[in-house]
Amino acid sequence: MEVRIIHGDALQVRGFSGLVIPANRQLTLGWGSHLAEKVKKSGGAGIEEEALSKWPGGISCGEAVITGAGRLEGYTHIIHAAVLDKYDMNPLFLLRLKMRTTPECLTSAVRSSLEAASKAGLKGVVFTPMGAGTGGMPDRICASLTLKEIVEYSAGGRETSVDAVAVACYEKKTAEIFENTLRQIQEAQSR
């Protein structure tokens, strides 16, 4: 499985059929992640409506479910990876007093997203730094957990349709952290 880091907007990445968005466990797109809000605006309310009709009670943190991509250009599927709880809002989250996305939730969400993509027969998926930002997780921890799970999944010898994964980082500094982390993981794996 090819793994690469892209500096840029995940909605502008092409050549991948699935986009993994950090979601709240209630599966509403208008709250939590800025990417989820952008997906709803660009792809239409039908994406959220599909998720809410298929999973009316929501999903557990760490789970991932897949819907169509609506009118979202470039993607055929959206993978909703629950890394937040909409009702666990810390009004001081910008001060990072509370890490709202746990390491266990993030690693489970990454693995569940890859499993959902493979079950749907997707060849390539794009992740973003899930759990960072509103989730309060530091970029370095997010990069390490996300990339270790992706690399372990690809090295696990399991049958999967997914042969390419990208992590799109909007900020250059975050992209550099992910690039350095991926290089370290790959170097350690080759020893």
Image (cartoon, grey):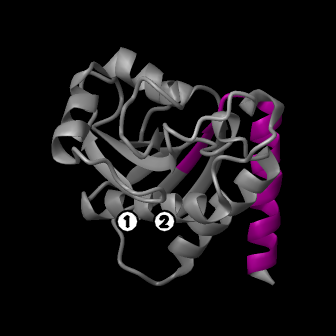
Q: Is residue 111 above or below residue 80?
A: below
Magenta stretch, residue numbers: 166-189
**Percent x, y for residue 137?**
73, 47
Three-letter amino acid code at disc 2? Arg
- Residue 88 showing in the rendered view: yes
Residue shown at the point (66%, 61%) measured from the top left: 103
Q: Residues within 10 Å of mark 2 (few under 14, many from 20)?
A: many
Q: Which residue is mark 1?
A: 115
Of residue 57 and residue 118, the one placed in the foreground of this image is 57
Q: Is residue 115 magenta?
A: no
* 172 with respect to 158 (left or right): right
Q: CA distance from mark 1 to mark 2?
A: 6 Å
Is 72 on the left or on the right of 83, as rendered?
left
Helix or strand or loop: what does disc 2 sit on?
Answer: helix
Image spot of residue 18 (x, y percent)? 37, 44
* Numbered marks: total: 2
Which residue position holds label 2? 111
Quarter of the image with the C terminus in it: bottom right
Q: Which amino acid type corresponds to the residue marked 1 in the rendered image?
A: Glu
User: Where residue 168 sits: x, y (%)?
Assistant: 60, 38
Q: Quadrant of residue 187?
A: bottom right
Q: In x, y percent, where is residue 57?
A: 26, 48
- In the image, taking residue 123 as reference, residue 91 lies left or right, namely right
Extreme left residue here?
Answer: 53
